[in-house]
Each structure stands twice: as structure tokens, then as C-alpha cells.
Amino acid sequence: MGEITHQEAVISDITLILEAAEFAAARHQKQKRKGKSRRPYIGHCIEVAATIATVAGLEDPNVLAAALLHDTVEDTRTTREEIREQFGSAVDDLVAEVTDDKRLKKQKRKQAQIDHAPHLSPGAKVIKLADKISNVREIAHDPPKQWSVKRREKYFDWANAVVVAMGDVDPELESRFAETLAEARAILKKESGT
């Protein structure tokens, strides 16, 4: 049996990422984000993976595939077994690390994210940080219509607490989060007239 060439490895990596994108698109097919624009949910998943690739410059196919799949177990009927079977244990482990336990009440889930943040693997931290960047940006620019300024402020404070709890992740992603958070807070300040 011959060795895998660099080109074959790249094609295999690209295939893994594209298959993860297709899988996530199918699983989130009928879901929309909560913002006024009702953005298709898959856009968020792609944004998280793209942020990792472009801002952090990370090319790890397992991290990028897991970024695309990061909400499938939490927000669809997808099981960990399906992720493991189709994408391998490395992707499944990353997805599991960033998946909330929906059996917990909302406040306990939010606190659990803060409590578990320092213990995430480096790949899971990158996904979690890119997810927070996407969420903060979207809640600032396209908030759910029922969310008050106060609720959005609380979300931004909580997202920041999760990011702070993670510690050092990636300087470029951390900088992007800080910029996104500052912009989001400025938008709220303008909206509230303070």
C-alpha cells in the first residue's frame, strides 16, 4: 500500500470540510436565525468556520468541519454517533466540547459555558470564540425583534465572560472579538440614546 500524496491529503481534507458543510446544511435546513432578517441557520455555521480560516488562519480540517457542525447535536436531532460515524472521533470530540446540555435550564447552561471554558481543548476554544464573534455581531446588527437593549447587553456581558474564562486562544480571534464587542456596545449605546 502506497503513501498518501500531499495532493490526496488536501483533497481528503477538503472533502471532509465540504461533507460537513453539506451535512450541516441538511440538518439545519428548516432553521432560521432569530434575527429580524430570519437568516438561514447554515449561514451562521459557515461564518464560524470562515472566521476560523480567515481571521485565525487555521487550516485544521477537523476544527473547520467541527465548526460547521458545532450546533447540529445541540439544535437538531443529530446524535454524536452520527457525527462520529461520518466525520470521525476528532470531529465528534470537538463538537461534543462545544455542545450545551439542553437538559439543563438556560441559566445553568450559560453558567456551565463559563465554568467549562478554561478546560476546552485548543480547537474547541477556537470554535467557541468564533461562535461568540458571530453571535455578538448578529445580535448587534440583526437582533431578535423581541430582544430589548437590556437583554442584548446581558448577552454581550455573558459572551465576554465566556471568552475571558477561556484565557489565551488566538490573538487575531481575540482581537476580532474585542472589536466586535466594542462595536456591538456602541450600537446599543446609540439605540438607547445614552
Image (spheres, grey):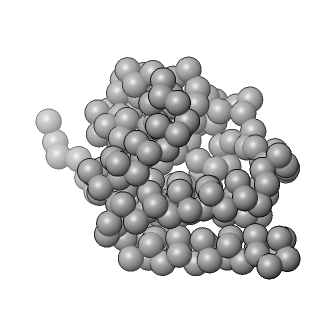
Point out the image quarter for the C terminus.
Answer: bottom right
Decide: is 6 above or below 19: below
Give me the residue at 72% from left, 33% from top: 31
Residue 127: quadrant of the picture:
bottom left
Which quarter of the figure is the N terminus placed in?
top left
Q: As drawn, is 55 to the left or to the right of 164?
A: right
* Viewer-side residue, 12 vs 150: 150
> Do we see residue 16 in this rendering?
no
* Image coords of residue 4 (percent x, y): 23, 47
Give residue 190's quadrant in the image: bottom right
| Image location of residue 170, percent across then percent down | 37, 70
Above-or-below relation of 192 to 75: below
Q: Position of residue 149 (x, y in %)?
A: 77, 60
Q: How many marks?
A: 0
In-image side of 44 versus 87 (left or right):
right
At a point 68% along the width and 73% down the height, the residue shown is 185
Where does the image place residue 45, in percent across and percent down from the top left? 59, 47
| Residue 96 shows in the view | yes
Residue at 35% across, 52% down? 117
- Looking at the image, residue 76 sits to the left or right of residue 92; the answer is right
Depth check, front residue: 125 or 193: 193
> Residue 174 falls in which quadrant of the image?
bottom left
Residue at position x 17%, y 46% from top?
3
- Which of 43/9 is in front? 43
